[in-house]
Image: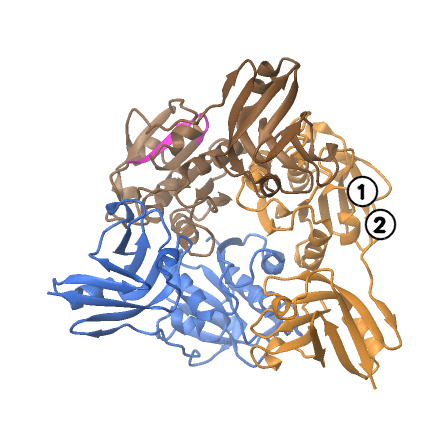
Chain colours: A orange, B blue, C brown
Amino acid sequence: VAKIVTLTTDFGVRDAYVASMKGTMARIDPDIRFIDITNEIGPQDVMGAAFVLRTTLPHFPAGTVHLVVVDPGVGTDRRAVALRHGEQRFVGPDNGLFSLVLDGQTPDELVELNKTQYWRTTAPSRTFQGRDVFAPVAAHLASGRSLRDVGTPVDELHRLQWALPISDDQGIQGWVVHVDHYGNCITNIHRDNFESSRRGRSLKCFAGNGILFDVYNTYGDVAPGEPLVLFDSSDLLEVAVNAGNASELFDIRKGDTVNLIFVD
Amino acid sequence: VAKIVTLTTDFGVRDAYVASMKGTMARIDPDIRFIDITNEIGPQDVMGAAFVLRTTLPHFPAGTVHLVVVDPGVGTDRRAVALRHGEQRFVGPDNGLFSLVLDGQTPDELVELNKTQYWRTTAPSRTFQGRDVFAPVAAHLASGRSLRDVGTPVDELHRLQWALPISDDQGIQGWVVHVDHYGNCITNIHRDNFESSRRGRSLKCFAGNGILFDVYNTYGDVAPGEPLVLFDSSDLLEVAVNAGNASELFDIRKGDTVNLIFVD
Amino acid sequence: VAKIVTLTTDFGVRDAYVASMKGTMARIDPDIRFIDITNEIGPQDVMGAAFVLRTTLPHFPAGTVHLVVVDPGVGTDRRAVALRHGEQRFVGPDNGLFSLVLDGQTPDELVELNKTQYWRTTAPSRTFQGRDVFAPVAAHLASGRSLRDVGTPVDELHRLQWALPISDDQGIQGWVVHVDHYGNCITNIHRDNFESSRRGRSLKCFAGNGILFDVYNTYGDVAPGEPLVLFDSSDLLEVAVNAGNASELFDIRKGDTVNLIFVD
C-alpha cells in the first residue's frame, strides 16, 4: 500500500515550515511520500483552502492522508481533529475547513486528537501545531494507525457553509469563489444548476465591468484575447479570456458577484 | 527500474491543477515518483517551456517520462501525442513544443494518443486534458506500457523552429531566449558559434542599454555589482551581473536582441 | 534505510536549475527521495539560508543529506566541502554558511571535495557546480558512500558568525534575522536570554515604527489585526500581527534593530 500524505497550507515556500513538517513525518516513517497540493493558500484563508482541496480530492488514491493546516486559531482552544470520509483521511484544525470540504456531510469517522504519544512532543508549540501535532499524526495514520488510535471519537465538525447562488425565473446570481493562476474567475454556479435554470434561453453574463454572451466549451473557441464564459474541469461556471487574464481585463476579484440573465 | 515522471507546466502552484495530475497518476501507479521541472512557465509560453526543458533533459535517467502541458489549444483539434527520443519519453499536446525540444530532429517513436482506455475518462474535460489524458498516459508509460499501447504511430511532429543568431564577418546578432531567476539574460548564441566567429578578436557586446567587453569564466571574475559576459552551464552566451540583476540593470527582456561586434 | 536528500538553494523554481540537480542525483541512485527545504532563498543570501536551514534541521531523520547551494563564489577558489555533524550530513560550498548552521561548532567530520570520480564531470561548469559537483556528491553520500570516499579531510570550516543581541541591565537590543511569509519579524533574541534579563519586569518593545507591550503565547491571544510580541516555534522573539502582516504594518525589514526595555 502506498503511503501518501498531501499538504495544503498557507505556509508559503520561502520558510522552512513545510520542510519541518515533512522532516517530522519522515522521521516517523521514511517511506511516506509527499504530494504538495499547495502551500500558497492566502494567509488564514480557510475557505480558499477548502475550495482548492475539494476540487482535487477525487483524484487521489484510497488511503491518502490529507494534512491541511490553515490555522488562524493556532494555539487557542479550537479542536485538533482527524477524520475519514470514504477512503480519504484528513488531519488538521477543526475551524470549519473540513465541513466545507465535505459540503456539510457528516464524516464517516471523526476524532479529536488527544493522544499525545502520537505528537512530536507533549508540549507542542503554541504557534506551530502543524509540526508538533498535525504532521506527526498524519504520519502515524499513513503508516498504519487508525483514527481510534490517535484520538477520541467526537460527533460534529465545526460548521461553515458555502454561499450558494440565488436563482429566480430571470437568472442566477453567483459569486467568484476562486481566481486561478491564469486569472480565470471561477464561480459557485454549477453546470447542473445553470442548465436547469436556463431552459434553452440565451445568456447575458455580467461580471466585473464586462458583459459576456453565450457559453463555450473551451478557450480556443474564441480568438486569442477574447473573453468567454465556459464550465471548468469541475463543472463550475468560469469567466475567462483566451490566452489572457479575465481578472485583470474585467477587474474581477474573489468574492465579486456574477449575474446571469436569461433572455428569450 | 525507477518510475520517474517529470512535470513541466504553466499551471502555477497556487491552484490544485498540478496536484490533480499527480493524484491521478498515483491512482494508476502509487510507486511513480514525481520531479517538478517547473510549473511556473509563463501562461501559454510554449517556447519558454521548450527552452527550460531542453537544458535539463540530459540530466535525467533513461526511462524518465516527461509530462509537458503548456497547452494554448486545449480542447481544440491539436493532437495529443507521446514520443520517445533516445531513452527519454514525452507526453503532451503537439503544439510545436516537442519539435523545439528535439531541435527539429525526428523522434525515434511518435504516437497520437487515441486509446481512451488509458485516459481518466472517455469524455475528457475540454479545458483540463492534463488531468484527463496526458497525466494518465504518462503514468501508464512510467508503469510499463509502451508507446504502441497508448496510441497509434504518426509521422511528424507539429513544427516550430528556434530563431537562430545571424552572423557576418563583423559579429553576431542573437536574442535573449530566457531571463532566469537571478536576472541573468541567456541568449541563443552558442559558445561554438561564438568562438568560430570571433577568431581571436576582442568583443563589444551591446545588450539593452549596456555595452560590455570581454568574456569571463564565472561571476566572481568581476567585482560584485559589475556586469559581465560569460557562457552559462549549457554553453550559451549570457549577460549577467555579479551578485546583481542584469535584466534590471540594463533593462533587458526576453526577446531583446544582443549584438556582438568583433574588433581587431 | 531511507535515502533522503534535502535541497536549500537560491535557485528559484522558474528555471530548471533545481530539476537538473535532482535529475543528476536520480541518475546516480533512482531511490533517493528529495525534500525541498526551500529554493527561494534570496539571491546569494548565505545568512538567510543558514537561518532557514538551522530551524528545520532537528526535524530530519538521521542519515539525511542536506544539499545546500547558495554560492556567491561559484567557480572561484572557495572550497567545496562535505561534512557530518551528529547524524546529519551536508554538501555545498564552504562560504561560511555551514559554520553559521553549526553555530561555530567544529563538525564531527569535514572533507574537501576533490575526488572527481564522484562528480558529474571532471571539468565542471564554472557557473553551476550545484549540478556538476555538489548534487552528484550528495547522491553518492545518500547512496552509501562515506565522507572519506568523496574528499580529503580538512580541519576548519570557513567562519562566519551570527550577530548576537546586546544586553544591559535596562534591556536587550537584537536584530530581525528573518521576515517570514506572513510578515512575522523573527529576531535573534532567544527566550532564555530574554527571561534571564527580564527578571519579572514589564516590557516595552520598540520595533520599526511600533511600540509593543507584554509577551503573548500565540497569535489568537490578541484580536485580529492587533500586534503582539511572542516566541516562535524555535523560541526566538517575534513581532507579529494576529491575522496580519507586522513587517508591513510597522515597516520592519530584515536587519532592523529591535529594542526591548524592561521597566519596573
Q: Give the number of the disc on residue A110.
A: 1
Determine whether, in the image, residue B236 is placed left or right of residue A134: left
**Amino acid type of disc 1?**
Leu
Chain of the residue displaying label 1: A
Against C184, is B39 above or below? below
Which residue is pictured at 51% across the width and 70% down the height?
A: B44
Residue B38 location (% of width, % of height): 48, 57
Q: What secondary structure is the magenta-colored segment mainly?
A: strand
Q: Do residues under tags 2 and 1 come within 8 Å of each other at their CB atoms? A: yes
**Amino acid type of disc 2?**
Thr
Which residue is pictured at 42% across the width and 54% down the height?
A: B181
Q: Crowding near pointer 1: few (<14 within 10 Å), some, many (20+)? A: many
Residue B78 location (% of width, % of height): 53, 79
Q: Which residues are magenta?
A: C79-88
Circle 2 sits in a helix, a strand or a loop, which is it?
loop
Circle 1 sits in a helix, a strand or a loop, which is it?
strand
In the rendered image, is residue C61 in sight? no
Determine whether, in the image, residue A27 is placed left or right of residue B88: right
Q: Residue furthest front?
A: C209
Identify the image quadrant of the C terminus of chain B: bottom left
Which residue is pictured at 55% across the width and 52% down the height?
A: B31
Nearest the eye: C168 or B229? C168
Q: Give the number of the disc on residue A106.
A: 2
Chain of the residue displaying label 2: A
